[in-house]
Image (cartoon, rainbow, N blue to C red):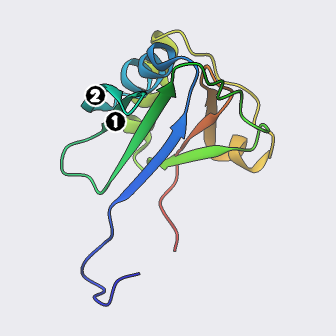
Amino acid sequence: MTDSPHIAPILRVARPTDDIAAVLRFYRDGLGLEVLAQFTDHAGFDGVMLGHRGFPYHLEFTRKAGHSAGRAPGQDNLLVFYLPDGAAWRRACARMEAAGYAPVVAFNPYWDRQGRSYEDADGYRVVLQNAGWET
């Protein structure tokens, strides 16, 4: 993907939703991501991009009028955020719960050993994993 081991590609995860306002509350208010950009009626699509400025990833959620995006195809459709610092992990979980999102039991029990899973309005799940990234 890149010829240089020193240049990391930027990742955008994009998916449709039936309720931009609900996913915005989940990922902004619960997960703590920033709104990086929003658009309305761009070729029939509305959308929002969330992340943190300067980080090499962001999430994009779009809605097309008259089109149903539906729900997640299963309970193991995950975004996993690794938070190795225990205090930061506890704060992230507390922010999710203060925003009204209770943890759900993970489909794969591996994620419950060192993490907590939360489900968005479309049935997609985010895992806050209290572990380091192992490559």
Tell me the residue at 64%/29% (across/down).
Answer: 69
Above-or-below relation of 83 to 33: below
Relative to 13, 120 lies left or right: right
- Image coordinates of residue 73 in percent, x first then y, are 78, 38
Q: Earlier in the sequence, mark 2 or mark 1?
A: 2
Tell which of 52 and 83 is nearer to you. 52
Relative to 85, 118 lies left or right: right
Relative to 107, 85 lies left or right: left
Disc 2 designates what residue? 38
- Image coordinates of residue 43 in percent, x first then y, are 38, 33
Tell me the residue at 47%/49% (across/down).
Answer: 13
Specify the quadrant that holds the N terminus: bottom left
Helix, strand or loop at label 1? It is strand
Distance of mark 2 from mark 1, alpha carbons? 6 Å
Tell me the residue at 41%/41% (across/down).
Answer: 59
Location of residue 25 by image quarter: top left
Above-or-below relation of 54 to 22: below
Tell me the residue at 63%/44% (across/down).
Answer: 78
- Image coordinates of residue 53 in percent, x first then y, are 19, 44
Tag of residue 49: 1
Q: Does the CB distance between marks 2 and 1 fall below 8 Å?
A: yes
Amino acid type indicated by mark 1: Met
Amino acid type indicated by mark 2: Gln
Location of residue 121 by image quarter: top right
Above-or-below relation of 21 to 38: above
Relative to 36, 107 lies left or right: right
Location of residue 77 by image quarter: top right
Disc 1: CA contacts within 10 A as few (<14), some (14-19) or many (>=20): many
Tell which of 95 and 85 is nearer to you. 95
Helix, strand or loop at label 2? It is strand
